[in-house]
Each structure stands twice: as structure tokens, then as C-alpha cells.
Image: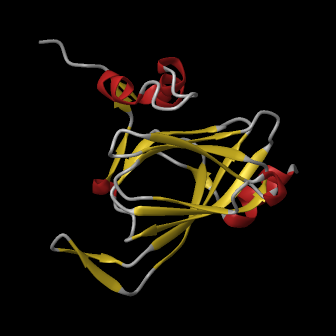
Amino acid sequence: MTEVEEIKKLLGLEPLEGGESGFYSQINTSAIKVRQKCKVFKANSSIYYMLTKEQPINYMHWLAMDDIHIICKGGSLSYYVFNEDGTSKQYTVGSDIAKGELLNLTIPAGSWKALKLHDGVEFALMVSVLTPEWTKKRVVVGAGQEFIDKYKFTSEWATPEFIMELIGPNFKHNKPN
């Protein structure tokens, strides 16, 4: 059994449905409730999340809640964050802090993000804590040409081709008039 297979089995990781890619399992959901925009949510929820050599990209998606990622095991990965103000930034999360890698990263609510394993990395296992809790209605997976046009060349790496790679199979075609 490979290390990836063993981790999947021990943590009960299942494929993440909905177009994002990767593997996950629920850890917990807070018993504490908070109010946000006249709605009540659990204060947080957390999952184990893993990208593998076979599924190296967590495709572009938007979250209405803060998403805190903490690396647990495995190699390095890049986070591509697209902010509401039209800026973009790349971060490297991993365990080599001497090389400037981050052990954790908070992606602010209202941002778009995609993750990609570095070349040659077998897997990256992390914990994701969402605050307030994750709900299906507060997530958008995929983007279209308008998104590409807004963020192209906002960073050196943000070419239209690379943004399209991060959107992956979830590209939303514009509807004909």
C-alpha cells in the first residue's frame, strides 16, 4: 500500500465532488453558532484535504467564508488567490520554512482560489478550517471569460492560459445572445 493509499484509508478520504478535485473527509463542525448577514451558521467546520499526483489541482472556486489551510504532511503546493479588488497573488505552502514556505495560509472570504501541487510532489495533506462553516450555497466553482479578462496579467504568472488551467473543466461559457 502506498503512503497516499494509507492516508486515504486511515482518514477516510473520499473524492471531493462538485468540480474542485482532490480528496477530503469531515473532521468536525463547531457547536457554537454565529450570526452573519442576518443568517445563523456554525462558527466553523474543518476537513482533511489532500491533493495527489493524480489529482494535482484544486480548481478555481469562490468562498463566502474565510478558509484557513494548515499543511500536515507531504510536499509543497502553490495557492493562487484572486481578490475582490482585482488583484492576484501566489503563495507557497509547505513545510520548508527556511525556503519561505508557509505552514498555514488564510484565504479571505470573498476571494477566488485554486491550488496546484509543485512538480514532482506525490501529495499534500492539509487541514482546512472554514469560518463560519462551509455550506453548499456559499461556494461557486468555476469561472468564465469575464473572470479571465478581469485577472489576466494582474501578476506575472496570471496569463490567460494559466488562469484557464486553474479553472480547468469548470469553464463557464458565455451564453449566446
Across and down, in percent, residue 172 comes to 33, 25
Please report the residue visible at 34 percent of the width from the left and 61 percent of the height from the top.
135
Tell me if residue 117 comes above or below residue 151 in the rendering: below
Q: Residue 128 occupies which quadrant of the picture?
A: bottom right
Question: Quick one: 6 or 78, which is closer to the camera?
Answer: 78
Give x and y (percent) for residue 99. 81, 51
Q: Residue at x 72, y 56 (%)?
A: 8
Q: Residue at x 74, y 38 (%)?
A: 118
Q: Quadrant of the C terminus?
A: top left
Q: Residue furthest right?
A: 1
* Residue 77 visible: yes
Q: Is residue 18 visible?
A: no
Left or right: residue 2 versus residue 73 is right
Q: Looking at the rendering, which quadrant does residue 152 occupy?
A: top left
Q: Residue 110: give x, y in percent of width and height.
A: 34, 53
In the displayed structure image, the side of residue 97 where residue 127 appears, left or right: left
- Determine whether 41 is above or below 121 in the image: below
Q: Residue at x 32, y 84 (%)?
A: 33
